[in-house]
Image (cartoon, helix red, strand yellow):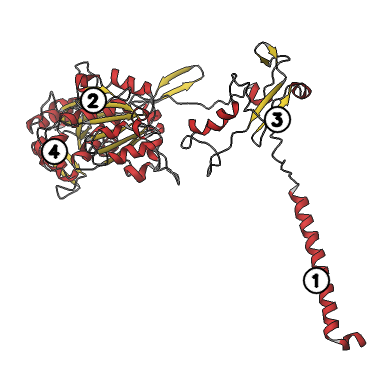
Amino acid sequence: MESKRKLTERDICTKFITPAIQQAGWDIHTQIREEVTFTAGRIIVRGKLHTRGKKRRADYVLYHQKNQPIAIIEAKDNKHSLGAGMQQGLAYADALDVPFIFSSNGDGFLFHDRTGQGGQLETELTLDEFPSPEELWRRYCAYKGLDEPASQTVSVPYYDDGSGRTPRYYQANAINRTVEAVAKGQKRALLVMATGTGKTYTAFQIIWRLWKSKSWQPKGAGKPKRILFLADRNILVDQTKNNDFKPFGSAMTKISKRKVDKSYEVYLSLYQAVTGNEEEKNIYKQFSPDFFDLIVIDECHRGSAREDSAWREILEYFSAGTHIGLTATPKETEEVSNIDYFGKPIYCYSLKQGIEDGFLAPYKVVRVDFDIDLKGWRPRKGQIFTKGQSTEHTWYYEHPYPAGYKNYSKTRPMKFEEFKPEMAWWGNEEDGFASREQNEQAWKVSIDEIKARNYNLDIKNPHISEQVSHNPNELLQAYADQQQEMMAIRQQLKDILGKALNPSLEQS
């Protein structure tokens, strides 16, 4: 016993903890990892220099299979108590999203079971009583509500290209939680992950595992699964197709030129490529409503979060499928709600956490004011031309907001058809711009007036009366004076009426 107390923590692991785990049936090559570093260490900037903070490292992580952690073991030397590493282990378990935590000093284990499947929250175990992989997986599935088919789906391995690339811990958390939710039949899921944390790679691994699952068969056994990945920028679709989604190979296609080919299994598309203002441009309706089993919506805080958007129409049309939303900035306003459609996020990885872990760089806000913003812009003398000749006048056209609009925004953008009145008013050179006349929205200003204004082009619409503003204190004082005057007149009228109704008051 005395010699055991002289051993280092590493010796305790090698001589007592690792043999006990192996004896319980855990595979040293595929299920046991020691000294697992899972953060990069916060980036600390001092002037022009930078360094890294301390990385978080668990003594042991036990896996159901690769990238699916199930238990944490924190080791201490024999001078510490059996449960001395428990608090540290609980903190690591929170980060790695595992329910089983063990602490050991080489004499045995203190077992903390968050699932409640063992009857007690914490139990002391001898070295020979360490639970087997099958026992912990049974408890895990019962805790998560995974039946046999769902358990098989959750056990589908990650894609591995042999390069050694593995998901970061938070990516694995997001992937595992999403696959579990879909395997249990959840139809809507929302993932919130900060910009730069690898949402597309996360989406790929989710899709890959569900695509490869033989137990997740929404249309029945033997029928191919159809998957749609939606984005709102062409560069995002191209990057996704050529990089993270490349392993799908010939099973994948990008919808373009408004052509539909139903022979593929994985489809990538812009929202704009399958919708339009005219019904014949809504090519998504060439697919049957139940065609897609899974739809992943990238940057879902944009148009798809709005109930009356064209993007939402696509999701509602394919409502029979499972929808997974990805965003860094979920929206919750009176008109736009991600949670209303997808439900509460099943996993969040914030910008703050990314900076704390060292996967994202810290930032400093620097305000820069441009001289044009501060001073405005005026053309230089003679800078306004019409086909090489100095112009005689400049036209102005004040675009009116559509009915019900007070302004434009990302969710209420300008639409091309709203400019048809301007285009008709502008006319063309063939008819000498005959249609261009002054009206309530249009007016012209001579070059002489612009010169007199020192080329200041900020000229208000002369057809709209200028709003006059007053000093608030002066308005309040004028109101008070009016009230006093009205009260005096009211008293005079009251006295006159009183005397008319009571002549005796006049005589007295």
Residue lying at the far right of the rendered structure: 507
Q: Which residue is mark 1?
A: 490
Q: Give the CA distance from mark 3 to mark 4.
A: 69 Å
* Identity of the residue drawn at 26% across and 30% down: 228
Question: Regarding mark 2 in the picture, which secondary structure is present there?
Answer: loop
Q: Give the CA distance from mark 2 to mark 1.
A: 84 Å
Q: Position of residue 56 (x, y in %)?
A: 31, 28
Q: Which residue is mark 2?
A: 261
The image shows residue 472, relative to residue 77, as above or below, that is: below
Identity, as a three-letter code, of the amino acid under mark 4: Ser
Asked if disc 2 and disc 1 are in contact, CB closer than 8 Å, the reply is no
Q: Give the CA distance from mark 3 to mark 1.
A: 48 Å
Residues 44 and 181: in front is 181
Say which label, 4 or 2, has the lower sequence index: 4
Q: Looking at the rendered structure, which numbered label has been put on residue 459?
A: 3
Mark 3, mark 1: which one is toward the viewer? Answer: 3
Q: Looking at the rendered structure, which numbered label has been put on residue 151?
A: 4
Say which label, 4 or 1, has the lower sequence index: 4
